[in-house]
Image (cartoon, rainbow, N blue to C red):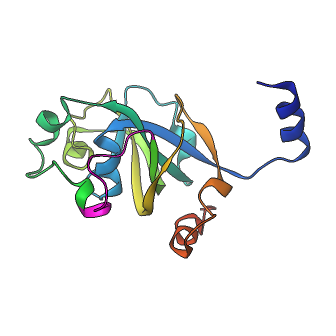
Amino acid sequence: MNPQKRLFDAIYPQPTIPAITLWQPWATWIAAGLKTIETRRHDRFYRLAGHRIAIHAGKHFDNWSLRIASGYRGKMFCVWQELWPDLKADPLGCVVCTAMVKEARWLTGADSPAALYPCGPNRFGLVLGNIRVLPEPLPWCGGRGIWQLPIDALTPGPAAVHEIVEGLAP
């Protein structure tokens, strides 16, 4: 990191919201409310419980996703058209929504339909709720693990975006 930026950030810290990056179409399915549990093989995201997070769609499209998820739901493709009619495809490299992490826990097979993914004792999950879709996907460079998105990135613009960041505190 640039030493001047590090000094600036130390003097003028910006409020941020934790964010996670998912491959598409998993991120869009969360925004649409079709997927309410995000899964991992590790429990490093446990500290997100009780916090609002940003969901970022990475630049990678998971080609196996439709095959995996179709076992739990019917129509799973072109969901983005209902959320953002002006787009021609799933947004890539964009923040698509925010969500409250209601719970962070190890999953069971009963969680599979909400996760759209086979769950069991070796899958950890973030149980999501109160999803707020951005009026337009916000182009942003994501990251691995938990990364921080400046709240200011979400607040300028239409009044609808202000509703997305209200209640960032649990």
Tell me what residue is drawn at x 16 percent, y 41 percent: 69
In the rendered image, the quadrant that contains the N terminus is top right
Tell me what residue is drawn at x 46 percent, y 37 percent: 21
Tell me what residue is drawn at x 82 percent, y 47 percent: 13
Location of residue 84 in the rendering, given as x and y in whole percent from the top left corner: 32, 60
Tally the marks: 0
- The quadrant where residue 120 appears: top left
Instruction: Provide the residue span drawn in magenta.
Output: 82-93
Which one is in front, 3 or 30? 3
Which one is in front, 92 or 47? 92
Tell me what residue is drawn at x 59 percent, y 69 percent: 166
- The quadrant where residue 31 appears: bottom left
Location of residue 3 in the rendering, given as x and y in whole percent from the top left corner: 86, 25
Location of residue 88 in the rendering, given as x and y in whole percent from the top left corner: 26, 50
Q: Residue 96 magenta-drawn?
A: no
Q: Is residue 123 above or below residue 37?
A: above
Q: Residue furthest bottom?
A: 159
**What secondary structure characterizes most of the magenta part?**
loop
In the rendered image, the quadrant that contains the C terminus is bottom right
Q: Is residue 160 left or right of residue 89?
A: right
Q: Is residue 166 left or right of residue 12?
A: left
Location of residue 27 in the rendering, given as x and y in whole percent from the top left corner: 35, 45
Q: Is residue 8 left or right of residue 116?
A: right
- The quadrant where residue 115 appears: top left
Q: Residue 87 magenta-drawn?
A: yes
Q: Is residue 4 left or right of residue 64?
A: right
